[in-house]
């Protein structure tokens, strides 16, 4: 079921997610991206909980590595589970962060 109000862009981009309880970043890949959220699969087996606030670093191009904390976007986990043996997280971006996420989605769609 699609719960997003904005169109999704199916795109696989490298990302990293700050896990507040584990106090570390977990590497992952986006499955899709929209102005208001993202669906991400993660390489680590650390569980996330709905309602948990996270920081996500999205790369506008495949292969690029997010390096600056200023590039991180705040979000809230809306769903978490396991898909194809990997941790999967649906993230809703917080308020003003949607514009930054939209710019990344547009850049990846144009590439």
Image (tube, rainbow, N blue to C red):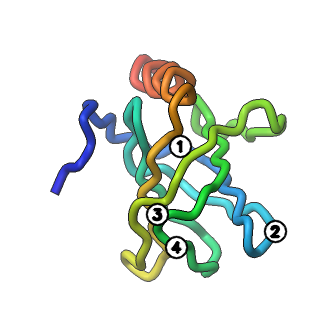
Q: What residue sits 19% from the left and 50% below the top?
A: 2
Upstream in sequence: badge 2 or badge 3: 2
| Disc 1 element | loop
Instruction: Write down the residue under mark 4.
Output: 49
C-alpha span from label 2 to label 3 = 17 Å
Pointers 1 and 3 in contact (C-beta within 8 Å):
no
Few, some or many residues within 10 Å of mark 4 (<14, 14–19, 20+): few
Per the image, the residue denoted by label 3 is 89
Seen from the viewer's position, the closer of residues 35 and 94 is 94
The residue located at (38%, 78%) in the rendering is 84
**Label 2 SS:** loop
Task: Tell me the distance, in whole angstroms, between the alpha carbons under discs 2 and 4.
Answer: 15 Å
Q: What distance separates the C-alpha of mark 4 from that of mark 1?
A: 23 Å
Image quarter of the N terminus: bottom left
Residue under label 1: 13
* SS category of the residue bearing label 4: loop
Tag nearer the camera, 2 or 1: 2
Q: Are marks 2 and 3 in contact (CB under 8 Å)?
A: no
* Residue 23 image label: 2
Q: CA distance from mark 1 to mark 3?
A: 15 Å
Q: Is residue 15 above or below residue 83?
A: above
Q: Nearer the viewer, mark 1 or mark 3?
A: 3
Camera-nearest residue between 8 and 29: 8
For marks 2 and 4 on the same chain, the one whose residue lies earlier in the sequence: 2
Compared across the picture, whether 70 is left or right of 39 comes to: right
Q: Earlier in the sequence, mark 2 or mark 1?
A: 1
Residue found at x 73% / y 32%: 71
């Amino acid at each position: 079921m699609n719960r997003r109000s904005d169109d999704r862009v199916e795109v696989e981009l490298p990302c990293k997610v700050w896990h507040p309880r584990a106090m570390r970043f977990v590497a992952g890949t986006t499955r899709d991206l929209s102005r208001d959220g993202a669906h991400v699969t993660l390489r680590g087996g650390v569980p996330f909980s709905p309602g948990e606030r996270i920081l996500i670093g999205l790369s506008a191009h495949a292969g690029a590595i997010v390096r600056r904390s200023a590039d991180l976007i705040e979000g809230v986990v809306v769903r978490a589970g396991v898909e194809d043996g990997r941790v999967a997280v649906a993230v809703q971006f917080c308020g003003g962060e949607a514009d930054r996420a939209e710019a990344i989605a547009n850049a990846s769609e144009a590439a």
